[in-house]
Each structure stands twice: as C-alpha cells, then as structure tokens.
Amino acid sequence: MTLYPNLILEALSHVKYPGKEGNIVSLNMVADNIRIDGNSVWFSLLLRPNDPFGKSLVKASEQAILTYISPDVDIKGHVDIIQVKPEPIATKQPLEDVKCKIAISSGKGGVGKSTVSANLAVALAKLGYKVGLLDADIYGPSIPKMFGIEDERPVADDEGKIVPIEKYGVKILSIGFFVNPESAIVWRGAMASNAIKQLINDAAWGELDFFLIDLPPGTSDIHLTIVGSLQLDGAVVVSTPQAVALADAIKGIDMFQNDKVNVPILGLIENMAWFTPVELPENKYYIFGKEGVKRLAEERGLTLLGQIPIVQGICESGDKGEPIALSNHEIVATAFENVAKNSIFAKIVEQNEI
C-alpha cells in the first residue's frame, strides 16, 4: 500500500465540522504539513484556541484514515492541533462614510441654535453638499417642526438600520420622531445618552459631506456622549450679542477647548445680530446689543463665521416648516449662504476626503 498526501486529504474530506457547511479540508482546517514514513502518517489540524470540537475532530480524522484508506495505517496519536487565532472581523466605525462631523452648540437656550442648525444644513445642501442633521436636543427637539416633518416616522431598512427622513436635500433624525410631541421627555442622563447613540450608530446615514449635530443648550451628558462616540471635526458656537448670552457662550467654548474634550472651535455665529424691517432693508436696529459675538471672537482668536439678522420672515418660515435659507431673496438666506460658503467648511471636506 502506497500512501501519498492527496490520498490522506481525500480521506479527511469525509470529516465534517459541526454546524458548518463543508469538511475540514474544504474549510482549510488541515495544515500543509502532512508527513508520511512507510505506513505511518502525521499531520495537524488548524483550529481556534479552545475549540470545543478539537478532540472529537482528532478522533474523527484518525477514524477517517483507518476507514477510507486502511486499518493498517499507523495514525493513532499522530494528529495534533495547531491553534490559529481568528482574523478580527472588520467592523465599521460610526459614520465611517461621513467626511465632516460638526457640532452646533450654544451656551444657553433661546439664542436660535436650532434655527441656525436647520438653515446651515439647508444652505450647505443648496451648495451641492450631501448633508445629514441630527437633532440631539433630546429634551426640546424642534428640527422636525422647522422642516415640516413632525408627522413623519422613520422606518428600518433591510439591515434593520433606521432610515433618516429626507427633506430639502438634508437627511434628518430626531428623537421628536419617536415621542408624543405634546409630552415632556423625562429621561435620566444615561437613557438620553443611549437614545443619541442609537440615532448615530443604528441609522443608515450613508455617504455624507457634512453631518451636523444640533446639541442641547449648555453643557451636559449629551455633549460628553457625542464627543465620546464620534471624532468630531469641530464645533460651531451660536450666541446672540447680549452680555448674558456671551457669558454662557464662553462656558461652551471652554468646554470644547477643555483637555478632556479637545474639539476644535471652527468659529462663532452671531445670531439676532440686528433687526431689519422688511420695509426698511437698509436699517439696522441692535436690539440685543452690537457686535458682542464679533468682539468675543476677536478676544479669543476665533473665526466669526457670520452675523445673522432678525427679520419677520425667519419666524414665519420656521413655523411653516420651510427654513428661510431656501429663499433666494431674503437677507437672512444670504447670510446663511455666506456662512456655508466660508472656506473653513470647504477645507474640512478636502482634508477628510474618503
């Protein structure tokens, strides 16, 4: 009887690995070290560390040789196991297909942060960018109202991922889609943080140039969750020019510049910079103070991304679910367009080209 490697492999092809299709040969579990000396055969099995079927596969391999070749083959005790570490499974990082992730923040409520987030998203989309907007203001989600999609309910795709609602070229998700709009959200910090993680990790955002995150006002667990879950490319801080708002804006800036957070400040936006009546478009009335955010930017060495005036139309457009940035004539729409065209945004996209 003449023994040769292919004869050994043919016999071992009758050995199945429990729970898998194929045999130990087709599954590449037989090492390329078959040694034959007369009537004696040695070889190794390639198995995971602590494989529960290791011993039974060794016995099955020995029996296959004796059954399908000859009972005279000297094989007992000649089959050993080489432990092979499984290759790590490649897992996609959150928002791996997103070029630029930007947090929109404010030190206090009432300064128009969500209005800025909505209109900046629309302005960027109008420039041809692929934009996503996450309403992370858990306790006061207003983005669905501003886009006129309060009654929309996201569905899951074939992979079980939440499909964002798309409006005006912007992909949108908000906790507001999943709760009664007339009920207060009374959640502890951990529950709110987990909800945000789901909207980030379990959603089909797809490829985006910009992913804007409308943060809650102030500094909270949500901010730390966002920073811990994502590698943010930067933050934009929104404030009105009045002193009380600027005091809180400084705290927001400090949070992002803190060593433990360390998120670059892309710039400041001065919202409600002045009031301009429709009938007197050249007039400016500084009802909240003049250029407070501009001075703060200069003092801190930060970029002033833009000054957004108040006009009657900005309130009306928000209530109708049509962000004013959609307009081609309003001075506020032009202001948001100028912010979106700021070279800072273009540079970030270029740096993060996928």
Image (cartoon, grey):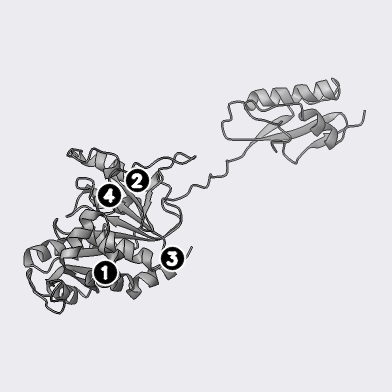
> For the residue carrying disc 1, how many other residues have a C-alpha within 10 Å: few (<14), some (14-19), or many (20+)?
many
Residue 157 vs residue 12, the one in the foreground: 157
Q: Is residue 90 visible?
A: yes
Residue at numbered disc 2: 199
Which kind of residue does numbered mark 2 sit on?
Leu
Question: Where residue 333 is drawn, which disc sits there?
Answer: 1
Earlier residue among tags 2 and 4: 4
Residue at numbered disc 4: 144
Horizontal and vertical percent position of residue 268: 22, 69
Earlier residue among tags 2 and 1: 2
Q: Are marks 1 and 4 in contact (CB under 8 Å)?
A: no
Q: CA distance from mark 1 to mark 4?
A: 20 Å
Earlier residue among tags 2 and 3: 2
Question: Where residue 352 is drawn, which disc sits there?
Answer: 3
Which kind of residue does numbered mark 1 sit on?
Ala
Relative placement, left or right, of 113 versus 85 is: left
